[in-house]
Amino acid sequence: MLVARQPTNQDPNNDVNSRLSLREAIRLAQQYHPDIAAAKREIAATEASLRQAGLLRNPELVAMMEDARTENRSTTWQLNQAIELGGKRRARLSVAESGLNMAKIEFAMMVNEIRVTVTTRFNEVLIAQERQRLALTSLELTQRAYSAAKKQVTVGKVAPLEESKARVAQSSAQLELAKSESELVIARQRLHSMIGNKAPSSIELVGRFDTLPVVPDSLDVEKQMMQSPQIIKAKIEVEKRAAMADVERSKQIPDITLSLGAKREQLTGRQQPMIGVSIPISLFDRNQGNVQETISRLDKAKDELQSTQIRVRNELMQAIQRLRFAIDEAQLSKADVLPNAQNAFDLALKGFEFGKFGFLDVLDAQRSLLAAKAQYLRSCGDAHLAAADIQRLLNDQAFEFYPATDSF
């Protein structure tokens, strides 16, 4: 069970087993996630394919016997060796190397995706925890308002209807608290599913939901964009298709087969050396269809590379804009909106207790305060999601989005 709460004084010897920072969560996920093991096996498989592609063709041993009668029998032993021409072996190696590079970039993309997912779910738990605290605060506020309304009804300053309104508001706050607790449980489970069974059964998350990411510099983004795993993958696909086209072109040049052997005639006891060359004649099938197919697929890969570059650039610019807006909104809410909303509620409640305001004024001020706090949480969540999108598009180590702290 993941327990998200503020750090408490604990035994330092048990600190590793009970507290979980974001960095440690990422380490656990990248070490024990089953998809990581599967991707590593794919790399091992492509490495084996690369070794196989570089091997020479095996020779062929042929034995022939003419005439079943012993006195007239002649026996021939022949060794045939195919010689590849046209750079077939080199082209095969290029295709295999591209396959290995593709497996490696897909592994890097998977590691980055797991890192981004863990970061997102870690922050989701912290924000869900804060929503639960907000619901508790809301319940406390409604309880204060209900107590104030009950006192006013008792002394006859307001009608009993005001007390009923306060009770309805309190019941709504209780329902909202139950909902926030359920969302927190779900967020914990989603994070635990990424960490796996290697994580301790009871974990305290170490971090703050309001530690906002930093907006990356646009010039640095332009430089790092070409190192985006998606763009690199598209480039490798172009290289692979070009190598496959070279393989098909090389097949247009026929291979020759050299033969070396000896023929022994049983009747005369004479042994004759044999040397031969076999050359296929490319009269009808010149592999022209396969060559055209690979060229068309190469052109398609080049078009997809251009499309990927445009898409990554647009998504990056949009994510940076969303991050910048979310951070500005969160900072404005924290510095201006939240203090004013809290002050308005305190004044409305105090004025209601002295009979200067009606209970509807208290409810309006309370709703404004809770809405401001909820908006602040949404802004923080949007900032974390935007930063996750940027990390997903860029190289894993391109930027450090969060300030260096013990929590992160």
Image (tube, rainbow, N blue to C red):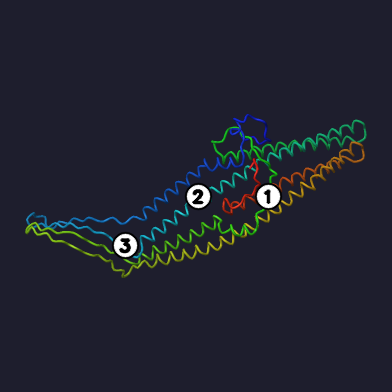
* Residue 84 disc label: 3
Residue that appears at 62% across and 45% down: 120
Identity of the residue drawn at 45% across and 57% down:
98
Location of residue 177 in the rendering, given as x and y in whole percent from the top left corner: 72, 37
Say left or right for 237 vs 135. left
Lower position in the chain sequence, tag 3 or tag 2: 3
Q: Is 92 drawn above or below residue 29 in the view shown?
A: below
Distance between the Cα atoms at labels 3 and 2?
A: 34 Å
Q: Are marks 1 and 3 in contact (CB under 8 Å)?
A: no
The local secondary structure at tag 3 comes to loop
Give the residue at mark 1. 383
Tell me, for residue 341, which label it has, or none.
none
Between 308 and 365, the one lying in front of the other is: 308
Q: Give the quarter of the image for residue 406.
A: top right
User: Of marks 1 and 2, which one's residue comes earlier in the chain?
Assistant: 2
Three-letter amino acid code of the residue under disc 2: Phe
Determine whether 164 is above or below 256 in the image: above
Question: On the rendered image, what quadrant is the C terminus found in?
Answer: top right
Q: Quadrant of residue 250?
A: bottom left
Q: Are marks 3 and 2 in contact (CB under 8 Å)?
A: no
Q: CB atoms at circles 1 and 2 under 8 Å apart?
A: no
Q: Nearer the viewer, residue 149 or 38?
A: 38
Mark 3 closeness class: few <14, some 14–19, many ≥20 residues within 10 Å? some
- Mark 1 Cα within 10 Å, few/some/many (few <14, many 20+)? many
The numbered mark at residue 107 is: 2
Q: Is residue 18 left or right of residue 87?
A: right
Check disc 1 and report its element: helix, strand or loop: helix
Residue 136 is drawn in which quadrant? top right
Considering only order in the chain, which callout, 3 or 1, is on the residue closer to the N terminus? 3
In the rendering, at what x and y percent does residue 183 appear? 67, 39
User: What is the distance, in whole Å, between disc 1 and disc 2 at their CAs?
Assistant: 27 Å
**Three-letter code for the amino acid on which mark 1 is drawn:** Ala
